[in-house]
Image (cartoon, rainbow, N blue to C red):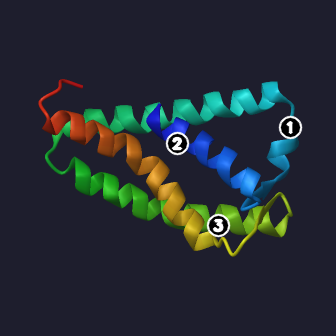
Amino acid sequence: MIGAAFAVVLNLIFARLGVWLSTVYTLPPPVLASMLVLGTALMLLVLAGYRWLARRSRRAPLLNSLLLVVLAPLIVGGDTLALSQRYLAFGDGYTIWMDVVVGAAIFALPVLAFELLRSRGLNC
C-alpha cells in the first residue's frame, strides 16, 4: 500500500503544481478510484512476488533491481506514446527521465519498506 499511497500523493502534488498534466485528472471520481484500486493491486502483486522470492533466494534484491532496469524502458515507451497522443503532458522542465526515476521509486518503495522491517526482525 505504501507504493500506491506514494503514487497518489505524487499525483496530487505534481498535478496541482502543473508538473504532471493528464486527461486522466478529468475523469469522474469513481473511475479515478478504480485506477487507485488497480494501482494498489499491482503494488501488492509486486510485493507478494518479492516476498515469495525473498523466502527462496538471497538474490531477491538483485532480481528486484533487474525488474527496475526492465521497468525503465517501459516507462520511457509509455510516456513517449502518451505524450505523442497528448494524453499526458509534463510542465516546469519535468522530463521522461525524471519520470523513470519516480516510477522506479514507486516500485522500489514497498520492497525497501519490507526489507527495512525484515532487517529489524519484524516478521513480514
For label 1, the SS is loop
How far across and how far down the image is residue 74, in percent? 57, 61
Label 3, secondary structure: give it: helix
On the image, the x and y values in percent for residue 100 come to 54, 64
What separation in Å lies between label 2 and label 1 (alpha carbons)?
20 Å
Q: Residue 97 appears at what percent x and percent y?
A: 57, 72
Q: At 66% across and 49% down in the image, what residue appears?
A: 13
Quick check: 13 left or right of 114? right
Q: Few, some or many C-alpha atoms within 10 Å of disc 1 (few <14, some 14-19, many ≥20)?
A: few
Mark 2 or 1, nearer chain start: 2
Looking at the picture, which amino acid does disc 1 mark? Answer: Leu
Q: Is residue 1 visible?
A: yes
Residue at the limit of the structure toward the front, as seen here? 17
In which image quadrant can residue 115 be found? top left
Say which residue appears at 48% left-offset and 37% top-offset.
43
Q: Residue at x 13, y 46 (%)?
A: 58
Of residue 45 and residue 111, the one placed in the foreground of this image is: 111
Tag 3: amino acid: Gly
Spatial CA distance of label 3 from label 1 is 23 Å
> Which picture quadrant has residue 91?
bottom right
Which residue is under mark 1? 27
Which residue is tagged 2? 6
Q: Say above or below: 5 vs 94.
A: above
Residue that appears at 77% across and 61% down: 82
| Vertical comparison of 37 with 103: above or below | above
Label number found at residue 77: 3
Circle 2 residues within 10 Å: few <14, some 14–19, many ≥20: some
The amino acid marked with disc number 2 is Phe
* Foreground: disc 2 or disc 3: 2
Please name whichever residue, 27 or 71, is drawn nearer the observer in this view of the structure: 27
In terms of sequence position, does the residue under pointer 2 or pointer 3 come before the other? 2
The x, y position of residue 96, in whole percent, is 63, 70
